[in-house]
Amino acid sequence: MKVKLYTILLTILIIGCTIKKEIPADIEFTVLPNLKDSLPAVEVNFDYKSDKRGLITLRYENNSWGDNDVFNCIHELQVLPKPENIEFNRDSSLITIKTKPNLLSSINYKIIQDYKGPPLNQYRYRPMMDKNYFHVLGMRLFMIPDGIFESDSSKAKIKISYQSKSDEDIFHSSFGKENVQNIEVNRDDLYGSFIVGGDYRRYSFTYDNDSVYFITRGNWKAFTDQDILNQLKQTISSQRKFWNDPRKGNFSVSLTPTYETWYSIGGSGFSNSFVSFASNNEKVTLAQMKWLYNHELLHKWISRTIINENEVEQYWFSEGFTDYYAYKLMLKNDFLDVSEYVKILNHEVIIPHYQDPVNTIPNSELTFEEFWSNYAKYMKLPYRRGLLYAFLLDNQIKNQSNNSQSLDNLMIDLFQLSLNDDSLRLNQKVFIRNLLKYLNHPEVESDFEGYILEGNLIDFQDELPDGLSIEYQNNIPLLKLDSEDFSDLGKRLKL
Ligand SMILES: [Zn+2]
């Protein structure tokens, strides 16, 4: 009898806990792929209540991440009960539905690929789909009712239910592999997420008790799935060790083929995932993919944890320092040797930077508008400018501290500060204040102003570690290895 009572009490307790966990979501999205339709589409459905004026205002970014007219991807928006009016405002990225006050409406729409033919890397942030698969970013799939996110930092409880039409379908998102996902995220983390389905292949491995997923599709010409999976394993392991991040959680990576005749790779790094794309032809190399994976994974920390105050204004940091660390961590972990590292700095950074007609424009001219509307013109500028400045600082800190400190210390400090204070934003003041802990020569601030704000080219003549010198070729100051034995230099560069 006693046992029975305990069992009953225990059952009540378990039920109590289970009920407690089920907090209703602020919004529930149902995602339904209609890939076999004549126009392949992903259908989204949700219910939302109008305010006391009878309005439902939905946000869907029409111009963002270099893409314009994303509203073209919206198809067949339907609202039930039939509303009085639906207004699409492309300039403000808003869709306004006028209905009766406080009325619950069911909103249904389709997202389509708005250009014909196979996916291209230049359109990688637009929805991609055909009869076999879809790849859509969170910000391109979900219309977000105003009021779901009260502020930039506030989080919402969101339920995503995927309704597959076939058992062979793979569904995966930045939030995991389950067909029903309950997440609590801020706007940035919903925007910066991916949702894929269809004929993707899913692989997984465990790192420090967290699952890492790799999702890809297509028949790759230049490498195998396993090649990229191995690279991902190495990258995850080396970067997690570098940051010594106490946060737990799964991580997801998608790799989607694009179809151009030249070589093109690209991606974007989010909080717990990144997306990657590569032309499916023989021109793509594993070395390029290695750089891409190192770069995109680093964004988990640089840009998603240490957050820019003003996006493009601090791209010198979130892209430039990310690129510097992509290469530095590859060197530290012996995925590159010293001669390969120096060759990359010369050929991927210094030469193109010196040949770049906009290489000395002031940082203030790189506004969000200017940068993203002239992406091809400015694309690599903050990467290279920031990387070279990071290289300078790294050399200076090592020099001043007799090799007992390096730029790594500053990066870890910025990471820890951001972890302890999620309102911290990286700007000139925060950066300089922390840099001064490691570097105290009189030109620290004027160097920053000159090299980053004004865009002056850096003279590395007296700023290189022993074993490296400058050699001019066609007026471009290239790095030169002083000796064939670069083991000591390697040790200094890896510090
Ligand atoms: Zn980047």
Image (cartoon, rainbow, N blue to C red):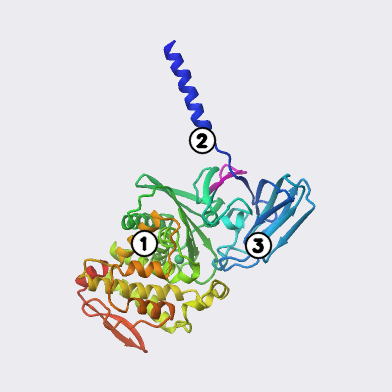
Q: Which image quadrant shows ligand 1? A: bottom left
Q: Is residue 136 visible?
A: no
| Left or right: 110 in relation to 289 | right
Q: Which residue is mark 2?
A: 21
Secondary structure at numbered mark 3? loop
Instruction: For label 3, count other residues whose C-alpha is less than 10 Å away and answer few (under 14), some (14-19) or many (20+).
Output: some
Quadrant hosting residue 346: bottom left
Q: Is residue 167 magenta?
A: yes
Tell me the amino acid under the disc marked 2. Lys
Image mark for residue 93 = 3
Labels 3 and 1 touching (C-beta < 8 A): no
Tell me the amino acid under the disc marked 1. Leu
Where are the magenta residues, as a range?
156-171
The foreground one among 71 and 114 is 71
Q: CA distance from mark 3 to mark 2?
A: 35 Å
Q: CA distance from mark 3 to mark 1?
A: 34 Å
Secondary structure at numbered mark 1? helix
Please report the residue visible at 55 percent of the width from the left and 52 percent of the height from the top: 196
Q: CA distance from mark 2 to mark 1?
A: 35 Å
Tell me the amino acid under the disc marked 3. Ser
| Left or right: 427 in relation to 132 | left
Q: Which residue is mark 1?
A: 414
Quadrant hosting residue 492: bottom left
